[in-house]
Amino acid sequence: MRILVIGGAGMVGRKLIERLAKEGRLGGTPITALTAHDVVAPARIEAPFPIETRVSDISVPGEAEALIADRPDIIFHLAAIVSGEAEADFEKGYRINLDGTRYLFDAVRAVEGYVPRLVFTSSLAVFGAPYPETPIEDDFFLTPLTSYGTQKAMGELLLADYSRRGFFDGIGIRLPTICVRPGKPNKAASGFFSGIIREPLAGQEAILPVSEDVVHWHASPRAAVGFLIHAATLDTAPLGARRSLSMPGTAASVGEQIEALRKVAGDKVVARIRREPDPVVAKIVNGWPRTFNPERSTALGFKAESSFEEIIRIHIADELGGKIVD
Amino acid sequence: MRILVIGGAGMVGRKLIERLAKEGRLGGTPITALTAHDVVAPARIEAPFPIETRVSDISVPGEAEALIADRPDIIFHLAAIVSGEAEADFEKGYRINLDGTRYLFDAVRAVEGYVPRLVFTSSLAVFGAPYPETPIEDDFFLTPLTSYGTQKAMGELLLADYSRRGFFDGIGIRLPTICVRPGKPNKAASGFFSGIIREPLAGQEAILPVSEDVVHWHASPRAAVGFLIHAATLDTAPLGARRSLSMPGTAASVGEQIEALRKVAGDKVVARIRREPDPVVAKIVNGWPRTFNPERSTALGFKAESSFEEIIRIHIADELGGKIVD
């Protein structure tokens, strides 16, 4: 089985490749080769199969064709300009997130008899306020309030149409906000959700730009990788024409996040969170969904954490070697 | 006030221009110039203002820029490859319906300080089965089952994002199936809904490819022109970020259509309908929505007919000079 990971240098892409390397197989089938693609060089990862890294811009015509030249059986399309940057740079967002995705889909379409599984990472940003008071159901309509969310929603529509036409076997997974993101902050407006856990645990100050009553939908990087692997191997027949799914997650208010951090790491760690309201971030976040009722993905076997405390403990185990800076 | 009609040679485009020509003004403001664009030459229409006709392909880069060179205050974007053809010719459908639309939107975006009203005609084809048993509400999700519906849904998403960004003041109107379409059948799979009324009234045989219990959502060409004119002039502030609206219409089963025809024109006319089931058409039509509860558009003042009989009488008045071939 050959695998292509587009966006392989990103946090989720790297963790996906690490897990595939560790397991050596996907859905019971041995992996024979993997290509890790990104606009910057993906990290070298040791694996029981050859990993080719490839650096290029998927929005350059011809690049997608080159990427699928060896006909990967599974394509993970994780590459995207994140929400904050897509909002700041209108043209770049559309070029990468919409055109890049379409070039990839069209490259696959152009190869007769080639029908790979294509896992597309979408986002909760396909939804926008106003929301019902109740959790968001699977049939809630696409109402993005950012260019990033618009581009992801358009990708979902293409994914469904190309799958219906039989050009590939697509599945879109709307990732919750990934928390706790390791490493440095990226340009996503959602970055503080991770920052207020990650920085204090590492002995550093974190800035909280919104109020504590902001509720959001989270899953750990470990859960996100689990979603991708499950999406790559499940039977897509039950999806019908509706190829994109909201993933399960854990709803938590910022206040509940902080209390979970206090329980796991104590007052001294929590004291490193500094309130500094940012109306721009608050406005973006207010347009985001809070909680979901992801019946379809749950019925299909996707699994997330059951509490925010569990999310913090996974971060400490996977990223900090079990150690907290007290 | 300068007006641009893209898709001006189509049936709805021509009727829109005829009405604007007759009234000489739009929303109380005199029309000073109108450009009628299409891929084939729009018909010559006499008007109290100059009408320029322009023939080109909007999916050719640079053409959209030329079309808006005189900065029309109102742009009606009606051009599209219809559902049957977009399904038969995948690339042409995406090129015209998606790329053409995006070229237009980007051409407007590129002109600093230019924020026209842009009326985009979308379609019920943005929705796809399975549906609830109840009428489709305004917050039903985008679930197209055709490439045409996918392209229209993507256009709606772009329209909302470009409007949110302030590049233009967009409004999308999802037209019911227009009935009775005058003239010859086009390639739309919905063509028979008009055919079974139009042909019998003109003394000709019509083919009915689906069963009589098929329910669908209709509005007359006259109502469609009314929607466009209302969309061009209403206050868009109440739309918020949700820029596309399902239009009001008349729900009727094919059986009810036939009985309305019998009431208006008699048994002899109805006898010209020949049943010839076509499973391909039946399958497409089964994916279409049946009835709507278009609260938003109704509250905003959009109006359709109150019965299918009224739709038939409008056809006889507007197209047949009041005369039926008995």
Image (tube, coloured by chain):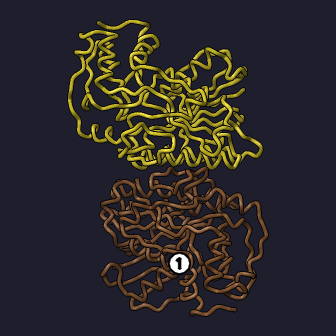
Chain colours: A yellow, B brown
B318 vs A114: above or below? below
Q: Which quarter of the figure is the N terminus of chain A placed in?
A: top right
Q: Which residue is mark 1?
A: B221
B272 sits to left or right of B229 = right
Can I make out residue B71 in this image?
no
Closest to the observer: B178 or A106? Answer: B178
Q: Which quarter of the figure is the C terminus of chain A placed in?
A: top left
Residue A269 x, y percent position in the rendering = 27, 12
Closest to the observer: A163 or A43? Answer: A163
Q: Residue at 62% across / 61% down in the picture? A: B93
B145 sits to left or right of B21 = right
A205 vs B84: above or below? above
B54 vs B47: above or below? above
Q: Amino acid at mark 1?
A: Pro
Q: Residue at 61% across / 93% down in the picture? A: B323
Q: Residue at 38% across / 60% down in the picture? A: B109
Quadrant for residue B88, please give it.
Answer: bottom right
Callout 1: few (<14), some (14-19), or many (20+) C-alpha neighbours within 10 Å?
many
Q: Residue at 43% across / 58% down in the picture? A: B159
B188 vs A262: above or below? below
Residue B135 x, y percent position in the rendering = 51, 57
Q: Secondary structure at mark 1?
A: helix
Can I make out residue A106 in this image?
yes
Residue B296 x, y percent position in the rendering = 39, 61
Count of numbered badges drawn on the protein: 1
Residue B303 x, y percent position in the rendering = 43, 72
Q: Chain of mark 1?
A: B
